[in-house]
């Protein structure tokens, strides 16, 4: 048994959206670091939050 599929849609609750953003951002950065180590390459990430501010 695997995890239940969730529908990808905009999260309406502002606080819940921010928490999800922080968790997903951390996961994305972790994957980028793993790719960098495995492939011996440099990775660049540009991430903007919902207010269009650079994070």
Image (cartoon, grey):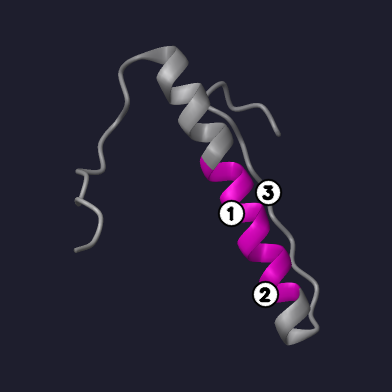
Residue at image position (20%, 51%) is: 5
The chief SS type of the magenta part is: helix
Mark 3 vs mark 2, CA separation in Å? 16 Å
- Mark 1: secondary structure: helix
Mark 1 vs mark 2, CA separation in Å? 11 Å
Q: Residue 48 or 26: which is nearer the viewer?
A: 26
Q: Mark 1 or 2 closer to N-term? A: 1
Q: Mark 1 or 3 closer to N-term? A: 1
Vertically, is 6 above or below 14? below
Magenta span includes 40: no
Image coords of residue 54 (percent x, y): 70, 33
- The N terminus, quarter of image: bottom left
Residue at image position (58%, 54%) is: 28
Q: Would residue 1 appear left or right of 21 to someone viewing this image?
A: left
Quadrant position of residue 52: top right
Mark 3 nearby-residue class (10 Å; few <14, some 14–19, many ≥20) = few
Which residues, given as a range, are shown in magenta? 24-36
Residue at image position (51%, 23%) is: 18
Observer-side mark, 3 or 2, equals 2
- The C terminus, quarter of image: top right
Image coords of residue 24 (percent x, y): 52, 43
Mark 1 nearby-residue class (10 Å; few <14, some 14–19, many ≥20) = few
Q: Which residue is mark 3?
A: 46
Q: Residue 16 or 3: which is nearer the viewer?
A: 3
Q: Which residue is mark 1?
A: 28
Q: Which residue is mark 2?
A: 35
Which residue is most to the bottom? Answer: 39
């Amino acid at each position: 048994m695997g995890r239940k599929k969730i529908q990808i849609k905009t999260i309406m609750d502002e606080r819940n959206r921010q928490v999800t953003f922080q968790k997903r951002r951390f996961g994305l950065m972790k994957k980028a670091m793993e790719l960098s180590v495995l492939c011996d390459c440099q990775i660049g990430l540009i991430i903007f939050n919902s207010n269009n501010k650079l994070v």
